[in-house]
Image (cartoon, grey):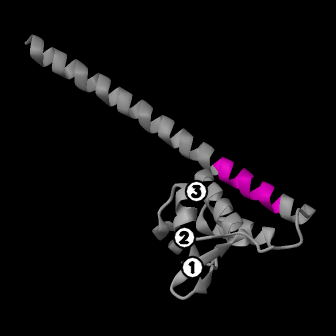
Amino acid sequence: MTDPTWTISELAQEFSITPRTIRFYEDQGIVSPSREGRNRIYHARDRTRLKLALRGKRLGLQLSEILSLIDMYDGPGDSVAQLQHYLEVLEQHRDALKRQREDIDLTLAEISRQEKTCRALLAARSAA
């Protein structure tokens, strides 16, 4: 029985991404398909690594963080060290997102103040 394989088009369709995105991940060393002539053949390992990369991207992780996490999965498995590292990455990312949210909230509050001032000035000029 042979292991399942996928073409670049099949993976692109499955994950709703473009073949160009998959080639980018190939350039970054995340997937490494075999070749049959000019065609790329992706194996289960490639599919799993691509899935993890896309999940990391959805979480907003940087490419270096994604690579680090994916490389952990090529190791011996769910070791304590791997899980602790993953937890640290998630905590750092959560903290960064919280800081961004605070910055966004402050910016939105300032925009609201400026809008209120601008509307009051417009109302005063319209009444005059």
> Residue at 81% across / 62% down in the picture?
85
Q: Which residue is mark 3?
A: 14
Badges 1 and 2: C-beta atoms under 8 Å apart? yes
Give the magenta part as a residue range: 84-95
Give the SS element for disc 3.
Answer: helix
Tell me the quarter of the image containing the C terminus: top left
Membership of 99 in magenta stretch = no
**Number of residues whose C-alpha sits closer than 10 Å to that of mark 1, classed few (under 14), some (14–19) or many (20 or more):** some
Badges 3 and 2: C-beta atoms under 8 Å apart? no
Q: CA distance from mark 3 to mark 2?
A: 10 Å
**Number of residues whose C-alpha sits closer than 10 Å to that of mark 2, classed few (under 14), some (14–19) or many (20 or more):** some
Q: Amino acid at mark 2?
A: Ile
Of all residues shown, which one is farthest toward the left?
Answer: 128
Q: Which residue is mark 1?
A: 40
Of all residues shown, which one is farthest toward the right?
Answer: 80
Q: Amino acid at mark 3?
A: Glu
Of all residues shown, which one is farthest toward the top?
Answer: 127
* Residue 20 x, y percent position in the rendering: 46, 70
Q: Which residue is mark 2?
A: 8
Q: Considering only vertical position in the picture, is 46 above or below 118?
A: below
* 63 relative position to 91: left or right: left
Q: Earlier in the sequence, mark 3 or mark 2?
A: 2
Dominant SS of magenta comes to helix
| Residue 111 falls in image quadrant | top left
Q: Earlier in the sequence, mark 1 or mark 3?
A: 3
Membership of 94 in magenta stretch = yes
